[in-house]
Image (cartoon, rainbow, N blue to C red):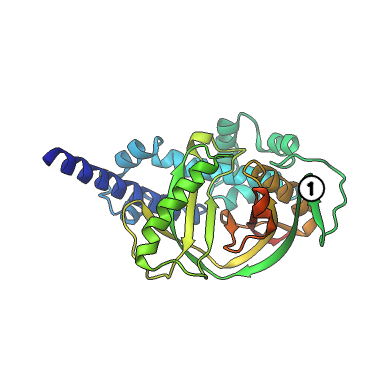
Amino acid sequence: MKMPMMKSLSLQRMKEYKARLNRVMDYIEMHREKEFNLEELAQVACFSKYHFHRIFHSLAGETLFAFIQRLRLEKAAGLLAANHDTPVTSIALDCGFSSSSAFARAFKGQFGMTAGHWRRTRQTLYIRKKNIDIPFEDLSFSRLRGQVEIRDMGALTLAYIRYTGPYEGDSKLFEKLYKKLYQWAFPRDLVSEMTMNLTVYHDHIDVTSHDKLRISVSITVPPETEVAGEIGKMTLPKGRYACARFHLGSTDYYEAWQWLFSDWLPKSGYQPGDGPGYEYLPFIQDEAGSAGKLTVDICIPVKPL
């Protein structure tokens, strides 16, 4: 009996370590423009500052500094592609770089080209058909149809399970993660008709190495909800979102995100805001479900252009 008990205890401890790692990653993501110090981040993770750097490196597969730098550069890459008129220096400073020269060196080291070359060659991270006139009220693209609403969303407290790695088109992965989350939530009476199902995307699938892509399969919970182990808790701050409703099969999601960024966003008068985008799955599914598709709202933070 001793060996199974020791193995179970070891798994619980590893889940606790990963939960603390997720907590500090969320903190960095929400404050990526500020200048961090080791003591501050170690306190967020509840680890000793003398050992936190080594723990982070061993669990995340990259150093703490490399993670912070990568998040800032990937954010800048997205802003460069989506905001053609914003000066490169402004984007660099907004993403937490101390100077344009420091940003230029780091960007070229990460992507193998200058920020200006990236902007000229990519134009947008989502490349799709050009010169398509799509009315705002009746948005259609390829096989997809949807409507976009601008919503002022209140803050959302989420309980989540974090996954790191490739996920595109893997419906079984999402089913597994949601099943595990609901097995935790149901006994705690956290599921009702008001519960929202969200998948939060922390990284950009066209920029981040696929083995480092992070998603959080989530449900809304009361702010006072207690979590532990692999179940984490985070808050999406209040803000303005563009929410596009689609009827999607398992292989349609990437194309829907592409359309939202490459066709709708440039014509909308908005630009991407701060914070991650997410997919919202309404409990009530319409006739799309009978065709093997789900009704999905893709929501991205926006601000005036």
Residue pictured at 58% horizontal, 36% vertical = 107
- Say left or right for 176 vs 51: right
* Residue situated furthest left in the rendering: 2
- Which of these two is toward me, 216 or 87? 216
The residue tagged with tag 1: helix, strand or loop? strand
Q: Quadrant of residue 111?
A: top right
User: The N terminus is located in which quarter?
Assistant: top left
Q: Residue 180: image x %, image y %? A: 40, 51
Which quarter of the picture shows residue 106?
top right
Left or right of residue 84, residue 232 in this image: left
Whether residue 193 is situated above or below residue 30 in the rendered picture: below
Asked if residue 152 shows in the view, the reply is: yes
Q: Which residue is drawn at 72% across and 51% down?
A: 260
Q: Which residue occupies 71% across, 34% down?
A: 117
For label 1, count other residues whose C-alpha is less than 10 Å away and answer few (under 14), some (14-19) or many (20+). Answer: some
Viewer-proximal residue, 268 or 232?
Answer: 232
Q: Which residue lies furthest to the top in this view?
A: 112
Specify the amino acid type for callout 1.
Answer: Phe
* Residue 148 coordinates in the image, percent (x, y): 73, 60
Residue at x 57% of width, y 63% of height:
283
Q: Mark 1 points at which residue?
A: 141
Whether residue 258 is situated above or below residue 289 in the rendered picture: above
